[in-house]
Image: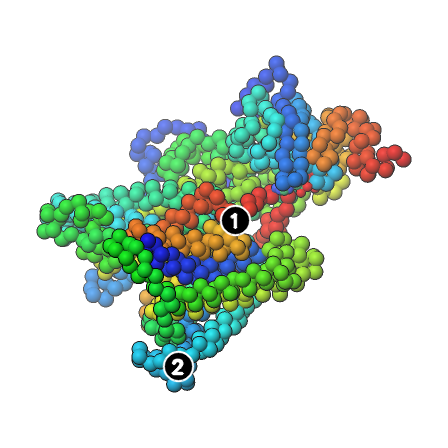
Amino acid sequence: MADFAQTLMTTLAVGSLYALIALGYTMVYGILKFINFAHSDIVVLGAWISFTLTRWLFPAVGLDAHNPDSPAPPLWLGASILIAAVVACSLIGFVIERFAYRPLRKAPRLNVLITAIGVSLLLQNLGQLSFMFGPSPQKMPALLSNVELWRLSLPSSGGARNVVIGLVDVMIVGTSAVLMIALEFLVFRTKIGTAMRAVSYDLEASALMGIPVDRIISYTFMLGSALAAAAGFLYALKYPGLNQPAHTTWVLLGLKAFVAAVIGGIGNVRGAVLGGFVIAAVEQFGAYYLSSSYRDVYVFALLIAILLVRPSGLLGSTVREKV
Amino acid sequence: MTNVSTANRTAPNQASPTLLAVEGIGIRFGGLKAVDGFSINLPRRGLYGLIGPNGAGKTTVFNLLTGVYQTQAGRIFLDSRNLVGLKAHQVVAAGIARTFQNIRLFPGLNVLDNVQLAGQLHAREGLASTLLRTRRYAHEESEIRRKAFELLGLFGLQERCLEPATSLSYGHQRHLEIVRALAANPKVLLLDEPAAGLNSQEKLELAKSIRHIRDTFDLAILLIEHDMGLVMDICEQITVLDHGEVIAHGTPHEIQNDPKVIAAYLGADAATV
Amino acid sequence: MRKPNPDTPFDSPTPPRERGLLGTLANSAWPILLGIALAAALHYFWPLGPGWLYYKKVVLDVGIAIILAVSLNIVNGMTGQFSLGHAAFLAIGGYTSGIVTYYGSILLWKSTDLHGGVLGPGAWLFVFACLLGALVATAAGYVVGLPSLRLRGDYLAIVTLGFGEILRVVLQQTNPILSPDQLDSSSLKNWLPPPVGGAVGFNGLPTYTTLFWVYVFVALMLVVAFRLKRSSLGRAMISVREDEFAAQAMGVHVARVKVMAFMIAAFFAGLAGGLFAHESGLILRPLDAGFLRSLDYVIMTVLGGRGSISGVVLAATLLTVLPEYLRDFDQYRLIVYSLLLIGMMLLRPQGLFGIHEIWDWRPRWFTRKPQTRSPSNEKRGAA
Ligand SMILES: Nc1ncnc2c1ncn2[C@@H]1O[C@H](COP(=O)(O)OP(=O)(O)OP(=O)(O)O)[C@@H](O)[C@H]1O
Ligand SMILES: [Mg+2]
């Protein structure tokens, strides 16, 4: 019981991260019908930009990043770093779309996919250069002390055990929830959201109806990148040992988020959120109850099963290809 | 014109005059009944027409007949063989080949290869003999090539056989589509607007070629066409579709004077005037 | 100007005449015999001396890269599928053959040292192991090919990528390698999962990979690729790539063609894996199953031209040799690759040579401008 509750808490936190990242995949896929391979690298950028800013700003506010006993930084510091990372990544997302993807708007999808892989490689390896983030892993200073919020005593196989719910997990779930609700509002309640949905439904018809398609696509990329940056920031909070930008953990993180988008039904915003939590549950519970070495395997097994049984995902609708 | 062998076609079965029997097939896309209760009996060596306004469901009928879409009702028999449930490639093997309304040649293959492609339908040599280049394989390949080359002669495309398919003029591309379909050795040929985009001279020649093909290859042909002159000229029987339903069927003369057909083409008011 | 094209339709068909074994050999086996002769020449006339040893390794690597890139080109180039998991087949072939030679050598000869020369008993064990690895990879190719029947384009890319990554994770969990002494006392526990070294990699394999065997397999690969391209199956593959739907309407069994492409490609990747695993100075690691290594070969096919065998051979050679000379710039290598990919897609998406072979271009420079694709194939409405 205690183990279950603890795993559930992790699932919620990790699931929120997957959901945030999956949203970016799903929005771009919904509109341009291709996998934005570079999306996971925006997450990486978000994490590394947060790290860099933290390292700069800590001395500025009189803190020592290397001293574990130094007092916790003020909350506004974390918030402003989050905002800075979000803004920076939105701009990068805009630039990528404008210069790498827009010229290929009419090209076969495979070409766009290859370009996206190229952009992804480029971001990873630029990031690894020594004048950027460097080629070695780094430890993110704690922006938030992981205060114990609740302690529940739950029965477990070896007698009662404590389940600790910490501030970091709650912060991750809370921030993600706020962002997702904001996105939901944006997509379903505002004019821009309506235009986005129209473009995703039929790009050409929307253009004919006078919707500024290019601008809407730019917004979509910026929005997706903003969420990815937030995910990167939160990821660095939870897992302070940051791997270098071209490390495979990032590729896997992106892949899992993409799997989440597919499982939820690609193109479907609510599906991406659902998919994020499903993936996290499979991964965390599989890791806990079966074997943690194979956690990535469970996720892909689920992906393959879903694609074979219900290719349109849990919440997606089947589209028949017109010939 | 080249004399093309028709040797390996099954002998015509004189007992049943109907080659392709279609009964009440249909499909809906969401709420739209694209085709509903479509029937036709195409005899051996028949040359029938299928007409109707834009969006009437003509191409969808072809897609149903060729297994691209599975019919949701009714039956399709070719030479008393049931075709319902077959996949698209199996339907071709069974003997129905088609052309496309918007030309779909393979740009990466040259003219000859576009036609030779169908050779693999009847090829018997497997992967091993392909890779080993056995004599039998080489012979089969050269047979396929010879046949494809001969077929290209139908439209005088032989000199251009090594050029990329997309370098041909629009009219020639339409011809190549027909040749490519013929290479599959079909019993029934479905032509989807073969005259679209041709000038009147080319249309006349096309009409002649279509008749010629029917005669030399002993085929039944079902033709979708918007050019009424052409259809009335060469088709023996015409079926008219509107909103997915057959609204008339008969000889060109009957169709021309059918008020329902006139209404479908000109709008309901025109018919009563 | 133009060489007589063996495929001009103007030759009259010759009736099939049964020739004896020798006749068949002379007719159909000469390219591979020639390849073996060239490989032998390369092997025996390669200069000795420490300086040449380094170049030898480069030439070996080029050969292996050619096999991998040309085989991937059958799937990604000719058939138009998009696999991002080609390295997985390399790893499967490599690990399988490694198990055979490593433990086989211990069982047969009580040590993992080389046994005999280029054509000695050890080398034959190695060739057998490579073929076995290739067959296991083929079986995997069948399994990976199956999703390609339902998934298109980028979905397939993700599934193949996932396959490679899963394999990488699984390989990391394998048992440590057993030394000859440990082998006798090993129990089932040591063999499940197989003792192939886990995250460290499968080291200590006998280094049987020589110029001779690499280039024999390169010759085999090239003969198969060219014969395939100019065959019924090859045309069917290209038609699937160009327009799957129209291909089906021409009677092409699309599912079968795709799975065949995957299996043939996997076979050769598995073979190359065997060569890779037994090359001296290299250790086969779980990482070699993963995405980054697959990407190397994807870039070669994209650069060379999706479908052009000679173009891909050229690209594989260049992209293997150049980084050797740019060792100091290794951190920039992938940056250059990524810019190549992006630039290629923006400027020349069909690759350097498109689907053509290098020699196809010569006459065209004299006669006509290269063909531009007709717009009718880009956008499609209702058929
Ligand atoms: N795959 C599909 N999904 C949804 N609707 C479809 C599909 N295929 C066809 N339709 C619809 O079915 C109707 C009939 O289309 P079809 O292409 O058969 O018409 P047509 O008679 O060939 O017209 P045209 O003369 O313009 O070629 C149209 O309204 C079309 O939009
Ligand atoms: Mg039509």
Q: Quadrant of ligand 1?
A: top right
Q: Label 1: few (<14), some or many (≥20) within 10 Å? A: many
Is A323 left or right of A311, judged from the image as shown? right
Is C110 left or right of C169, judged from the image as shown? left
Spot occupied by residue C148 in the image (x, y as percentages of width and height)? 45, 44
Is C64 left or right of B153, judged from the image as shown? left
The image quarter in which residue B14 lies: top right
Viewer-proximal residue among C185 and B231: C185
| Residue at the extreme right | B273
SS of the residue under disc 1: loop
Viewer-proximal residue among A36 and C270: A36
Q: Label 2: few (<14), some or many (≥20) within 10 Å? A: some
SS of the residue under disc 2: helix
Residue C60 visible at all:
no
- Structural distance between the alpha carbons of marks 2 and 1: 44 Å
Q: Residue at x 48, y 54 (%)?
A: A274
The kind of residue tagged 2 is: Phe
| Residue at the extreme top | B15
The image quarter in which residue C304 lies: bottom left
The kind of residue tagged 1 is: Leu
Viewer-proximal residue among A308 and A274: A274
Q: Chain of mark 1?
A: A
Image: A133 above or below B108 = below
Residue C195 visible at all:
yes
The image quarter in which residue B48 lies: top right
Q: Residue at x 57, y 33 (%)?
A: B70
Q: Residue at x 59, y 49 (%)?
A: C377
> In the rendering, which numbered label is found on residue A315?
1
Q: Residue at x 34, y 47 (%)?
A: C268
Residue hosting label 2: A58
Is A152 left or right of A38, judged from the image as shown? left
Spot occupied by residue B33 in the image (x, y as percentages of width and height)? 67, 36
